[in-house]
Amino acid sequence: MTVTVAGHAGFCFGVRRATEALEAALAEGCSRICTLGRLIHNDGYCASLRERGVEEISAADIPAVCTAAETGEAITVVIRAHGETASVLQTLEECAARTPSLRILNCTCPFVEKVRRIAREHCGDDEKFLLLGAKDHPEVRGILSCARDGIVFGSAAELEAILALNPFGQNAKIVPVIASQTTQNLSEWEKSLEILKKVYTNAKIFDTICSVTEERQTEAADLAAQSDAMLVIGSKASSNTAKLYDVCRARCARTYQIESAADLHRLDLSACQTVSITAGASTPFSVIQEVKETMAEHMESFEELLEQSLKTLNTGDVVTGVITSISQNEIHLDLGSKTTGVITHDKLTDDPSAKLSELFKVGDEVRAKVIKVSDIDGIATLDKTRVDTDANWELIVAAYENNETLEGRIAEAVKGGVIMTVKSVRIFIPASQTGVPKDGDLAVLVGTTQKIKVIEIKSDRKRAYGSIRAILREERKAKEEAFWNELEEGKEFDGEVKSLTSYGAFVDLGGVDGMVHTSELSWRRIRQPSDVVSVGDKLHVYVKSFDREKGRISLGYKTEEMNPWFIFNSKYQIGDTANVKIVSLMPFGAFAEMVPGVDGLIHISQIADHKIAKPEDVLSIGQMVDVKITDIDAENRKISLSIRALLEQTAEVEEVVEEAPAEESAPVMYSTDNPDAYKSFTGEEDK
């Protein structure tokens, strides 16, 4: 016979949360603990609570409990995962507010609390709250107590009958709001939605069936379809167990509901080759394990069973188990005993976004450390990261000794630095070693992957200190080394001006700075570098010289194409006329700007067509005038200009015009030193 246990069998999140809270209260030594109703639907566990002094009370006992608390008796009231009615909770909370002796442990399942919130928020005049659930179930009673005039129905057929009676009257504005008891049958919920949508297209739908319940039912249905027999373990008073039984019964005719291994004697499974086991949310793992082991007795020797029954686990033990199931938030291990190992997501990996189904598979062996053992529900809480940390600590020490680079993820920002996890080992990086500027926000590093060097080890406390800056320094040094190795005179760069001094501009060439001297910034004389460039400007420069030992690079910026004399020669030649600006006046003449950086001289004798005493009698600074280029001394870079030449040229043309005969037909020979000027002046062909 092959026996398979469903991965989602047993305690759900809400039930486990409630039992752990109660166990913690017992461990604290609370003098009087009361559960409002049965904490879970399991006779064995509830009996063990009574043996340890836990009382089970009802709503009718609340006044007496409040009275006792008001007299000074310390009482802890535990609200079970199903929750309680709003009026009962209000009474307890008001008493606790005025009576420090009363403490309330509200263990209402978060999934149930979500439905209660929906009921409170969607029961106004224009909304009608509908709930799929068992009318007498404590969870349903608690939910309905939060709504005004809510309607509960137990099946899709019942909902159809209710809607046929037009429960909302003639109010066309009514919007139905539908939710479900967290442990409802998924298929019944889907049928109900189909019926509601046919009548009300504006319905608000809240899918509140617990995801664990959905997974449990889906998995159980799949197992039932593949099995000769299906065992559903749980109390007959448990709603989710009853739903689980119905789901399995629809797939497997030989489906049995049992409460413990003691019920196996009434079942005939002799003809079954494959048997699967699932369990309701209130069934302890110890009961599931006991049923499984009882069924497997004929396949194991008495000595092996005895060894397993005597095997105990202690906090701090390192154990090896085989993965039997994997969910989104935890894995279960077969530890070879009546205790099932459970490892939650955060105790398996440092990466909160990692998917456990991608990291592990059923059948894998896992080594982990025992951090808590509960014999009541047969669970050992394990921590894989602690085992990994112990094993990986030596790798961190080796990296420190060998000056190796490590890579890890920044997990959190703390006072004075950040925490990085490397192979499950936490390494502290002081703020000064993060590379973040002083007083900067360290949170920007959280979630990023960084490389570090281990700069200090404290083996006695297993603490390591790392540095991101050390890596940055190494990378910068390597980059600089490569830069200098490839540097040569004449090499060109596109750089950015990083700073200015009185003698030049420093340009970032890609991690290394070079300097452009003031004399190299412009062909014309400047007072300071800021006359030409600003910080942040992009410059195309070239290497004039460098000294690697001193780390100095002299850069050139001027090119022949930028030379004003080159620009002048490409634009003008002797005999050309130009419109220029007077830039200075001297006793011997006036200087005019030909192009920025190149001036020409208009000698005093060339300013007018008559004798003048001084240049300012005719010209002024800033005045624009037309001049003729009469000479260019390329060797000495001097230019001679003349206004007079243009004046005389114009006068000659005018004289010729005045002497012309009146009759156009008479052939006349014209003579001028400048025929082009005449043609420009008269617009006629030169004869």
Image: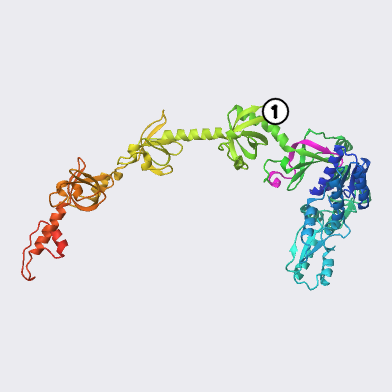
Residue for badge 1: 461
Q: Quadrant of the C terminus?
A: bottom left
Residue 365 included in the magenta stretch of the image: yes
> Residue at position x 60%, y 39% from top?
442
Residue 112 lies, in percent from the top left, at: 80, 54
Q: Judge from the rendering whether residue 463 lies leftward or rightward of residue 5; answer left or right.
A: left
Q: Judge from the rendering whether residue 6 lies leftward or rightward of residue 470; answer left or right.
A: right
Q: Is residue 147 above or below residue 410?
A: below
Q: Which residue is at the front of the view, 188 or 584?
A: 584
Residue 42 lies, in percent from the top left, at: 89, 48
Residue 19 lies, in percent from the top left, at: 84, 44
Q: Is residue 178 above or below residue 472?
A: below
SS assignment at label 1: loop
When asked about the image quadrant of residue 31, the answer is top right
- Work out whether residue 276 can be spotted: no
When asked about the image quadrant of residue 648, the answer is bottom left
Q: Judge from the rendering whether residue 351 lies leftward or rightward of residue 577; answer left or right.
A: right
Magenta extent:
355-376
- Work out whether residue 396 can be spotted: yes
The residue lying furthest to the bottom in this view is 170
Q: Which residue is at the front of the view, 192 or 463?
A: 463
Q: Which residue is at the front of the view, 550 or 617?
A: 617
Three-letter amino acid code at the position of disc 1: Arg
Give the crowd class for mark 1: few <14, some 14-19, many >=20 residues within 10 Å: few
Residue 629 included in the magenta stretch of the image: no
> Residue at position x 62%, y 38% from top?
408
Residue 214 lies, in percent from the top left, at: 78, 55
